[in-house]
Amino acid sequence: MARKKTKAQKLASLRAKERAAKRTKPITKLDAYFIQLHEMAESMKAAGFDDATVQGWIVDRPLPDWAIENPDHFDDDDEEEEDY
């Protein structure tokens, strides 16, 4: 039969859990985005889509604009250098 925990053991366990909770990192936007993709893939599989179709949907999705810095493809400085 297991022994009952003392008040000191219960308190130590509670404090250890609180310290562990403080050490975890907050979820970033990128984490949330990939969690969303994972949930979408699981939902598609549950709906009966095959793995190739699910993978196609996931791979073909572009990353959101905030995930990477998009270069400026329309550099206005080039227009000033042209001779007319």
Image (cartoon, rainbow, N blue to C red):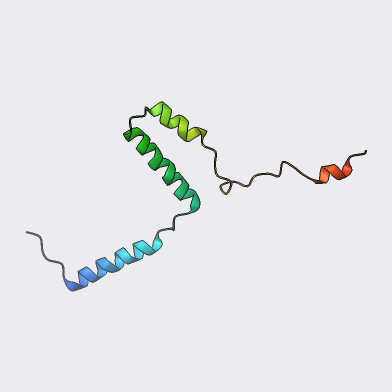
Residue drawn at x 35%, y 62% is: 21
Residue 22 figure quarter: bottom left
Query: As drawn, which residue projects farthest toward the bottom?
Result: 7
Residue 24 figure quarter: bottom left
Q: Nearer the viewer, residue 2 or 63?
A: 63
Residue drawn at x 88%, y 43% is: 81
* Lateral position of residue 64 relative to residue 50, left or right: right
Residue drawn at x 87%, y 45% is: 80
In the rendering, at what x and y percent does residue 61 appear?
51, 36
Q: Which quadrant of the rendered structure holds the C terminus? A: top right
Q: Nearer the viewer, residue 59 or 43?
A: 43
Residue drawn at x 46%, y 49% is: 31
Instruction: Count up the numbered dots.
Output: 0
In the rendering, at what x and y percent does residue 67 appear?
56, 47
Residue 13 figure quarter: bottom left
In the rendering, at what x and y percent does residue 78 appear?
83, 42
Q: Which quadrant of the rendered structure holds the N terminus? A: bottom left
* Lateral position of residue 31 relative to residue 76, left or right: left
In the rendering, at what x and y percent does residue 45 appear?
35, 33
Query: As drawn, which residue projects farthest toward the right?
Result: 84
